[in-house]
Image (spheres, helix red, strand yellow):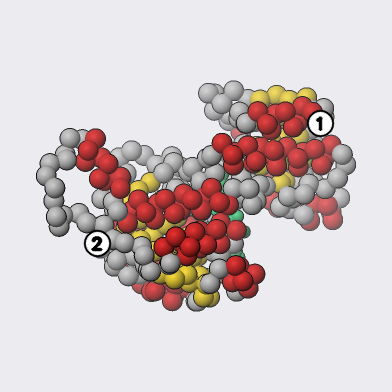
Amino acid sequence: MKVFITKKIPQAGIDTLKEAGFEISVHDESDKLSQQELIKACQDVDLLLNVGQGKLDSTFFSACSHLKGIALTSVGYDHVNLDAATKAGVPVSNTPDVLSDATADIAFLLMLAVSRKAFFRANQVLNGAWADFEFTKDLGIELYGKTLGIFGLGRIGLSLARKAQAAYGMNIIYHNRSRNTEAEKLVEATYVNFDTLLKESDVLSVHTNLTPETQHRFNAQAFQRMKDSAIFINTARGKIHHEMDLTEALRTGEIWGAGLDVTDPEPMQADNPLLKMSSVCVFPHIGSATIETRTQMAILASNNLIAVLKGNKMPQVVNADVYKEK
Ligand SMILES: NC(=O)c1ccc[n+]([C@@H]2O[C@H](COP(=O)([O-])OP(=O)(O)OC[C@H]3O[C@@H](n4cnc5c(N)ncnc54)[C@H](O)[C@@H]3O)[C@@H](O)[C@H]2O)c1
Ligand SMILES: O=C(O)[C@H](O)CO
């Protein structure tokens, strides 16, 4: 079988595919792939390894219903029209679990960086603005014993909760669609309604998937209900917060700080007003960007394609209904 890979992946992923006997072609990532080019490249292959956040919409699936499977290199699949994939009979897999700790590390890093205005401070040095030892100016806030509110206590939310409780004795509250009693066995966490999450969190960290229900859930109304000392963290998807409302909430002091690994749109432009604020830190979507995690993601994606080669179901399929329809 032939596989088209949309960007370079760690060698372990390539080796896994080659050992299984696949014929591989990898797109040169210096040249951004348009949808038309992707569709064209998929015409003479059996499988696609779609690296990153490249959209797969209904036009793509109408043109590529011959594909026997698509492996994503992300746990999030909001960039894929799964109904269209299922209708076209194409199974799609994701990469859960292997990236949870690395992504939670980035949420933790953002919490610390924002609370101590780390990037604003580092920029002072960089810009030659380190003048005197100031005693009361631009102070940070501490995390010890504070309340961490988690919106979406799934795999990544749980990993962050465990770190924050172990390292900083943080009190954990969370809101999910329903209580996560399995997670509550692993970490001391109290289930609260959304309004309580907003009102009681000193740090509020977002870990839900992007869906119509979570899109713009953090808007002006939500920020108004949060503490004026609160820090907002989003490592899930940029569309879950409303960026202009967030900017305004920070400008007017409705909340204290924000740390983002995801923005809307991506990439964020360098002249974005958020980047000038002292208690804001923005990363370029690097949640899973470690050598270890990206290697595991590439192997997991490859193993899902190997399952197709062997005539099996993809173990990490996200549109399981496709097998019923087949
Ligand atoms: N920044 C990055 O690089 C990066 C890396 C990995 C994942 N992510 C994002 O993080 C998300 C979470 O990943 P995960 O592996 O923890 O997923 P998960 O499915 O384990 O957890 C998501 C949690 O959100 C909850 N949830 C979903 N909709 C909700 C709603 N409307 N209200 C309340 N709770 C809701 C679910 O019940 C679940 O507990 C992914 O979907 C992806 O978008 C980003
Ligand atoms: O969803 C994910 O896994 C991350 O955002 C990486 O794309």
Disc 1 to disc 2, C-alpha distance: 57 Å
Relative depth, front residue between 5 and 33: 5
Mark carried by residue 221: none
Residue 76 vs residue 109: left or right? Answer: right
Q: In this picture, is 284 found above or below 21?
A: below
Mark 1: give few (<14), some (14-19) or many (20+) Cα within 10 Å: some
Q: Which residue lies furthest to the left in this view?
A: 132
Q: Which residue is found at the position 75% from the left and 31% from the top?
A: 17
Residue 20 numbered tag: 1
Amino acid type, callout 1: Ala
Badge 2 amino acid: Thr
Image quadrant occupied by the N terminus: top right
Query: Is label 2 in a helix, a strand or a loop?
Result: loop
Q: Position of residue 95 (x, y in %)?
A: 66, 47
Label 2 neighbourhood size at 10 Å, few (<14), some (14-19), many (20+)?
A: few
Give the percent coordinates (x, y) of residue 153: 56, 65
Residue 265, quarter of picture? top left
Q: Which mark is residue 252?
A: 2
Inspect this view and state whether residue 87 appears: no
Relative vertical location of residue 173 with respect to residue 314 in this rendering, above or below: below
Q: Are marks 1 and 2 in contact (CB under 8 Å)?
A: no
User: Residue at the location (60% across, 58% down)?
Assistant: 155
Where residue 27 sits: x, y (%)? Answer: 63, 25
Position in image of residue 231 (x %, y %): 35, 61
Locate residue 157: give its quadrant.
bottom right
- Seen at 82% across and 27% down, the residue is 21
For marks 1 and 2 on the same chain, the one whose residue lies earlier in the sequence: 1
Query: Could you tell me which residue is drawn at 47 percent across and 70 percent down?
Result: 172
Secondary element under disc 1, as helix, strand or loop, is loop
